[in-house]
Image (cartoon, grey):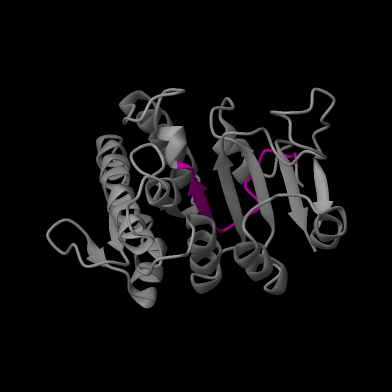
Amino acid sequence: MSSDGAAPYRRLLLKVSGEGFARKGEAALDLDRVKELASQLHHLTSEGVQIACVIGGGNILRGAQSSELGINRTTADYMGMLATVVNGLALSDALEGEGVQTRVMSAIDVDKVCEPFIRRRAIRHLEKGRVVILVGGLGIPYFTTDSTAAQRAVELECDALLKATMVDGVYDKDPNKEEDAVLLPDLTFDEVIARRLRVMDQTAFTLCRENNLPLIVFHLAAENGVVKAARGESIGTFVHN
């Protein structure tokens, strides 16, 4: 990873955990956190970085969690997709408030508030300097937003996938359960497999590995974390071939 201050990537896909849009322990939308993210994205777009975002909906509703409550899994997943639309519109509004043009593109039909996702149109928006916010997952149940992020990053020919989550990076063991867990700042895809480390779901991880798509995992709440990751500065965990 670079540390010279210049963004080494021309086009990035940022996957944002829905939980990162809420205060800890709450199921809501924290607009202050959304605005902080928008400020960082504004900073990057002003440097010429093209940015697509895949937004989760876990702060509002998680499909898998809803199914545990007795809701049909397919229905629950569609409910989760709609939750990502809410978050995506909030981020779009915050970015527009920063003077950054956006387009919210959805994999499910909500044409009153979003454009449909069309690959070539999305690429055109990116080339024009607009932040493309991708919501609605892949438009089908049983796929996570990790899988959506990897799929869209490959489709849109992104140089790297930035995964902003609620952990500092990839650890050798679960840091929430093991006090001696160690952060691993640099890993190859093969090392992740050999050590059976949890980075993202298997479908998403395989897509990244097979398409030589570098992955940076870091904490969304890290100070200027998105900017640092986009610039190739040392933050979180860098996973590569």
Q: Is residue 117 left or right of residue 44?
A: left
In x, y percent, where is residue 49?
51, 52
From what the image shows, is residue 230 above or below residue 39? below
For image coordinates 39% across by 25% down, the residue present is: 26
Q: Position of residue 124 (x, y in %)?
A: 36, 70
Give the residue furthest to the left.
112
Q: Which residues are magenta?
A: 3-17
Q: Is residue 28 visible?
A: yes
Residue farthest to the front, as pictured: 70
User: Residue at point 69% right, 50% down?
Assistant: 199
43 in magenta: no
Q: Main secondary structure of the magenta part?
A: loop
Q: Quadrant of residue 110?
A: bottom left
Residue 83 placement, left or right of 23: left
Image-quadrant location for residue 109? bottom left
Query: Does residue 82 appear to the left or right of 210 in the view shown?
Result: left
- Residue at the spot x=38%, y=56% of the render? 129
**Rendered position, 152 above or below 215:** below
Residue at 48% x, 66% y is: 152
- Look at the image and tell me whether residue 130 can be seen: no
Left or right of 12 in this view: 81: left
Quadrant in which the C terminus is drawn:
bottom right
How far across and how far down the image is residue 183, in percent? 80, 34
- The x, y position of residue 100, in whole percent, is 32, 44
Instruction: State the count of labels.
Output: 0
Residue 4 among magenta residues = yes
